Amino acid sequence: MHMFVARPGQYVFVDRPETNPLLRTNGQPAESSLLDLDKDTLTALDITSDTFCSAGSWLGNGTLVGTGGDTGDPPFVPGQQTLRFYDPMTATWEEKLMVMPSKRWYPTMLPLVDGKVLILGGSIGGTGLNKVELNNPTYNIWPPSTADGTPDPDIPMQFLVDTLPYNLYVFLHIVPNAENKNMLFILSNQQPVLFDLEANNVVYSYPKIAVQRTYPQTGTSVMLPLYSNNNYKPEVMVCGGQATYEITATADSTCGRLDLSAKSPAWEMDDFGGIPRVMPDSVILPNGQIVFLNGAQIGYAGFRKGKKNNPLWLSDNPSFNPVLYDPVGKVYTKMNPSTVARMYHSVATLSPDGYVFVAGSNPQASVAKGIKYSTEYRAEIFKPPYLLTDVPRPTILSLNGTNIAGNRITIGYNQPIVFVVSLTDPNPSFTAAIMHLGFVTHSQSMGHRFVGLDISQANFDAGATNQYIVTLTTPPNPTIIAPGPHYIYILNNGAPCIRAAEVLLN
């Protein structure tokens, strides 16, 4: 149901309390697990609170914080007001049980420019469409401003009242600016706005987008790749969804692009590669292209109705084919299909190794096997075209004199950083990007971001064979990409490095 890259080769999954076969040391089914592909191990992790339909985001200090969830059937405790902290260096969770001022289910979280995280909206209990009596039209920020760590009071947001009932898991992006302000793009119930977090007010209302895109008629959204050569022009893309709250309705087959810097912003619509898709996942690649995958062509998000022997599925007709989108040429290319249906509660993320890791799908309230859309325990790797060529891939050896293997290296903003790269290509052409891989759930990749990095020098290292010294410049300020754990990819003629460098930008 939830997934994030903890470190290179390591994927952390967060499910909900149910009868998963992987057991914790106390014999209870695991709610969370760590898959280490480098070591080929799967380890149950300890979480005691109910994480059903929660959210997560990375703090500037490199710790992941999650919050929200459900009521917590014993032995699990309620998760709606609980904070959970994952330390990737120790591979452990720590929980602060029931400390937040209000309950949240289906909130959205986002890394902020000061290294804190935003916790936005949701409902106080489980629902399909949100309701007035369940709505939580507030936000909170962690860490708090208090000296003793007591959570700050929630702050009301009228926009989350005005956009009922489609205001769960809203789309959120930081908009680049020169003032280091938390300027937020928020889309809820077809209405996008620019929101000044410090002033707590809507600065600008953009035109509405056609068709519902937020839960349960779920689409997906990305901030398109940001580059210095156009002054980090912010452009948001919103894709898929469902026009009708009806299980037999065909999903939407459009995407919209919105240039937030335009004098008169307007949605530029396209056909989403010709495949209707509700509950799609979106993954930005190190070359700036985007993979859209997973989801269904009919219906909307939610658990099946009825019993196992007579199910009524809320979504059907899996979208097996990924599509690859080129934001420059505005062209989609249909990719080879999977054979695994990735329906409700599927996830996908970019890996530090350049491929896309795909898992999940469980459109029912408990584990069920031997059914049309069974609880899915198979994971897949999708290899984009750039991994299927003969172009030599760089190997990053060091960053600022530190071996990248096993190290998370701290860097700052607006600084030159020096890489040593091994490459057998006698005619290399280097490009680079810094990427935040986010926290993935419900077609959201919270905080997912791509920023192209300028290369000031790339010289052959005369003292070593097949080795280059590449100097990059980090982004100028934290509105371009927030503080926290990121990955720097160096590419050669479009082929990504064997493994990205893990950094902490702060």
Image: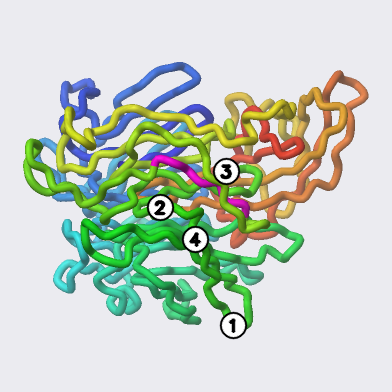
Earlier residue among tags 2 and 3: 2
Q: Which residue is mark 3?
A: 486
Name the quadrant containing residue 178.
Answer: bottom right
Q: Residue at x 67, y 35 (%)?
A: 496
Earlier residue among tags 3 and 4: 4
Q: Which residue is mark 2?
A: 444
Amino acid of disc 2: Gln
Using the image, determine if residue 210 lies above or below residue 332.
Answer: below
Question: Which mark is in front, 3 or 4?
Answer: 4
Q: Which residues are magenta?
A: 320-326
Is residue 108 within the magenta segment? no
Residue 65 visible (yes or no): yes
Near mark 3 (Cα within 10 A), the count class, few <14, some 14-19 or many ≥20, is many
- Judge by depth and name the residue closer to the eye, 306 or 170: 306
Name the quadrant containing residue 471.
Answer: top right
Earlier residue among tags 1 and 4: 1
Question: Which mark is in front, 1 or 2?
Answer: 1
Residue 395 visible (yes or no): no
CA gap between label 2 and label 4 equals: 21 Å
Q: Which residue is mark 1?
A: 264
| Dot 1: element | loop
| Lateral position of residue 459 relative to residue 355, left or right | right
Q: Residue at x 42, y 39 (%)?
A: 4
Question: Which mark is in front, 3 or 1?
Answer: 1
| Dot 2: element | strand
Earlier residue among tags 1 and 2: 1
Residue closest to the far right: 462
Question: Which mark is in front, 2 or 4?
Answer: 4
CA gap between label 3 and label 1 equals: 33 Å
Amino acid of disc 1: Ser
